[in-house]
Image (cartoon, grey):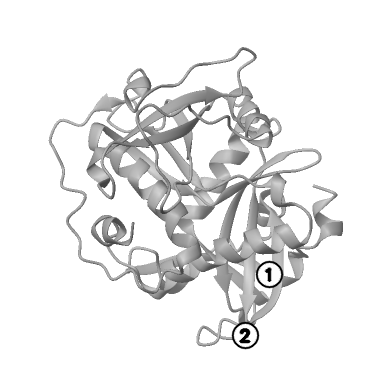
Amino acid sequence: MRSYLSRSISSLNQNKLRGLLAEVDLRKHLQQLGYADRVSPGGWIARRAGAGKFGHNTVVVFPEVLKPDIDYPTTRSKPQPAHGLHTICSTFHQSGIAAYYSAATVATTDDPDSMAWQSVELGLPTEQIYLPFPDSLATFFRNREKAYKFLRHKTGTTSIPDLAVPEEFSKEHLRITFQSRFFAEISDIDGIFWGEQFTYPIEIKEKTAGEDRQTGEYFGLDLGPFVKLAFYAAKRGNLHSLFVVREIESVQTRNLKQWWFITFERLAQFASWVPVGGGTNMQGGSSTVVRIPKAEFQTLDAQSLSKL
């Protein structure tokens, strides 16, 4: 799994690594609060690219998380997705976004090239069957005209904790399988929270608070994730979204200060209108962020989650 990730991930800068670690820690935190069954695994959201069609035909895909030292033979029975994921995907379907769960088979031990995915669409009123992935999405996307060498990198992965490797590998293999076939815009989903009232795609970041005269203490959010959260808001209905922050004392120690969150409605209301330069983004380049006052965030605890 690590060998595959070293070839698929272009760079593992500290910002990207902290994001992975924050995802792991958030799931631990939600488990401690009794909400482990209310959050989905990570996945991908993709939409068609190309002149005249850009932004149309959006799909969401969640992978089965493959575990080390487990056989996934081609004859295996396909798993039943969790009940909560069915509910989450129903919200996406009602918003005009097709949602799929993908399960894998591995024909040859320790050979990612022998892996094959099959997907079943969730959120529909009738039971669906597993179909080969990504062939089943051919009506949504156009084929990639030229082959692209995705597995070309030599990135060190020893800093990724063992606990995070299976999910990251499963997500990356699914992404490469999809992008090798189709030309599309794609972005990761850190997770989906199933609340009492609404369904919330989550954007998770690990942050130290900044401060300036205009906003006081604030947390910055890159423009890319901001636009993605705005996309969810544009769908309306029961699909909302959350920006979750794992506030730390310093990037050196990663010692937790507090978990915070803000709904996109409040984020959009209080975010700075003028973006400023941020730190290094997930791709290793410089980022541009909007500032959200820390005072507008809520503590991420059981009481606040019960009201979502």
Image x and y of residue 19, in percent: 49, 65
Can residue 15 be seen at all in this image of the molecule?
Answer: yes
Tell whether 255 sits left or right of 104. Answer: right
Tell whether 308 sits left or right of 270. Answer: right
Q: Say whether disc 1 or disc 2 marks the residue closer to the N-terminus.
A: 2
The residue under the point 50% across, 48% down is: 227
Quarter holding the N terminus? Answer: bottom left
Q: Nearer the viewer, residue 88 or 163?
A: 163
Q: Which mark is residue 293?
A: 1
Establish if 233 lies above or below 163.
Answer: above
Image x and y of residue 98, in percent: 51, 25
Image x and y of residue 196, in percent: 81, 40
Residue corresponding to mark 2? 249
Q: Residues within 10 Å of mark 2 (few under 14, many from 20)?
A: some
Establish if 188 lies above or below 239.
Answer: below
Q: Residues within 10 Å of mark 1 (few under 14, many from 20)?
A: many
**What's the amino acid at mark 2?**
Glu
Which of the 4 image quadrants contains residue 224? bottom left
Element at badge 2? loop
Tell whether 163 sits left or right of 30. Answer: left
Element at badge 1? strand
Establish if 182 lies above or below 4.
Answer: above
**What's the amino acid at mark 1?**
Pro
Q: Nearer the viewer, residue 234 or 132?
A: 132
The residue under the point 44% across, 34% down is: 103
Q: Nearer the viewer, residue 51 or 70?
A: 70
Can residue 244 be seen at all in this image of the molecule?
Answer: no
Mark-to-mark CA distance, 1 and 2: 18 Å
Observer-side mark, 1 or 2, equals 2
Which of the 4 image quadrants contains residue 134? top left
Establish if 76 lies above or below 179.
Answer: above
The residue under the point 23% across, 42% down is: 113
